[in-house]
Amino acid sequence: MSYEVLARKWRPARFEEVVGQEHVTTTLKNAISSGRIAHAYLFVGPRGVGKTSIARILAKALNCADGPTVTPCGKCDSCKEIVDSRSLDVIEIDGASNNSVDQVRELRDTVRYMPARGPFKIYVIDEVHMLSTQAFNALLKTLEEPPSHVKFLFATTEPQKILATILSRCQRFDLRRIPVPMIIQRLTEIAKDEDVAVSDDALLAIARGSEGGLRDAESALDQLISFKGQAITEDDVLSVFGLVSRSALEDLADAILRGDMAAVIGLVGALDSAGKDMQRLVLDLLSHFRNLLVCSCARDSAIELDIAESQLDTLCRQAEMAAPERLIGISDILVETDGRLRYSLSKRTLLETALIRCARAASAVSIEEILQQLNKLKKSGPPIGRSASAERSIPAVSTAPEASSTPAAAEVSNSEEPVEAGDEVGMLKTRWHEIVERVSRVAPLARSALLDSCPVSVSDDTLVIGFDPEFAEHCEVMKSARNMKAFRLALRDVLKRDIEPELRILKKSEAVVLPADVPATPQQAHDDDSPVAEKKSARATAGAIKEWMQNDTVRKTLEAFDGEIVDVRE
């Protein structure tokens, strides 16, 4: 008797033997039991997950001598003929090689003939997406209203290539990739029956390499038995299929999470020298970090982790090494690398560069973490462990305005008494730059407007401010509620009483005489290289720094990050 490969020998013969597709088999069994059997079914899914096997089981269930039944006997002539692909009533067609319109027309002509043995004539078309558009169109009418004795069973890996008019005439079933634990369980049963000793790590490696396809896993086990005989280890699987061991994958992920770039480069070099597939390594790493992300964000949802139980402890330990934001950043880099690696001439160099970026992303501080730390500092009191002497070591910052360079202004600054009305206009002109800076701290937009103005006259409760006609729009800017409120507060601090500013546009004959130490525009202030301007700019910056140093949050932030304020800009 000729040898039968494991994939055919262990092909499911009943609905109960189908692995990982209970949502499909349960629906089909209920449809058969209730007599609600559709005329066309479409089975969709990746390779090796059971599309054709389910179609054959359904054909046996419908044409069995005891049928229609959910448990075909497998012993009657009809069941045996279907298994051996020689049944006259179950016609299996390869859509890839029978995709012309003439072949579909021939099929359409034979549909009207009654079945030879069973109650139904069943057409099983595999890879149905390979049919041409003309062939699909030729099948439309027959598919919509077939004779009562005809059933169509379609299977495809690419449903997006099938015409929407065909899809609407079928009951669609989407088959899933089979989880790793289920594949391991099935391979264990096969190995036990075949009297083959396979280690747990070897089974895991085979299941990982099959990418959710049980047929691929069975074919791989068959190949390994031919290669090593009755005892198979993980090293045998890795050497035959070029896979990376679970331990090496975990070591590489561990080095990335620690930010150990030297270890990352060393591990990649060792794997490359051993002939491992770099493209597959990226996909395995991506799957590993996906599991880490699931473990980190939803540790209770272990069902979402397509892994063996022995891996869970390692995943939980590594998930604690990095925040979810960092794991997402690493996954993004690996996805980008997978797309670029397909067209790269130096795969090792590209992979090393990508994994170094991953290591940096794992150890870099994110903006979210900085903000969280700042919020903690803001909510907490003084830093824990700060002594009273440390509190006293912070120099007291005076809130009094900076003294002007002129003697008259110095007298006004140091005096707590209101200034005589006759001297106020001159004093205000002298201290105009200081007033402008006070206003700009609260209302930044007011600065450029006030720099083109000048105090004209002062009464008991009114200060007239003149604007050059050329800059009349600045007068309108200053009339906003925010700007006026900031202006009143600045004037009250200087004049030691409440006063209402009156904004007035001067006549062309009246010139706006600005104080000598006030720059006409902000740009001129930046371009002025005179020593006087430099001193005034330095004093303004120093005053702003001292003012910000009084803010508790700013001070705590500087202490937490060992920083300093270099400049203050509006």
Image: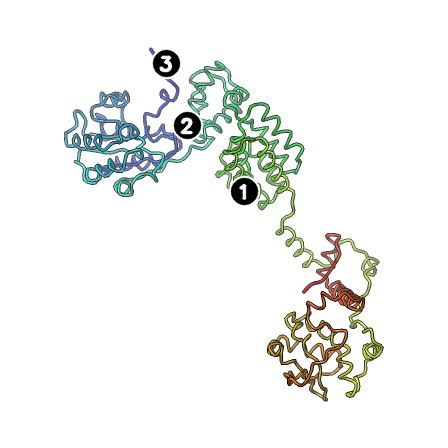
Q: Is residue 442 left or right of residue 236?
A: right
Q: Residues within 10 Å of mark 3 (few under 14, many from 20)?
A: few
Relative to 406, does residue 303 appear above or below in the rendering? above
Query: Residue beneath label 1, please?
Result: 332
View extreme (left): residue: 113
Distance, label 1 to label 2, CA atoms, is: 29 Å
Q: Quadrant of the N terminus?
A: top left
> Dot 1: few (<14), some (14–19), or many (≥20) neighbours within 10 Å?
few
Task: State the residue position of label 2.
Answer: 214
Kindly identify the residue that appears in the image at 65 percent across and 52 percent down.
370
- Residue 156 position within the rendered picture, expressed as x and y whole percent measured from the top left: 33, 34
- 276, 223: nearer the viewer: 276
Three-letter amino acid code at the position of disc 1: Asp
Q: Which residue is mark 3?
A: 3
Q: Secondary structure at mark 2?
A: helix
Question: Percent from the top left, x then y, of residue 280?
Answer: 51, 30
Which residue is rendered at x = 22% and y = 32% of the image?
104
As measured in the structure, the alpha-carbon distance from the residue carrying label 1 to the one carrying label 3 is: 47 Å
Rendered view: 158 above or below 421 = above
Can I make out residue 557 in this image? yes
Which residue is at the far front? Answer: 509
Q: Secondary structure at mark 3?
A: loop
**Judging from the image, what secondary structure is the residue with disc 1 in?**
helix
Above or below residue 325? Residue 41 is above
Estimate the spatial distance between the alpha carbons at disc 2 and disc 3, rounded to whole Å: 20 Å
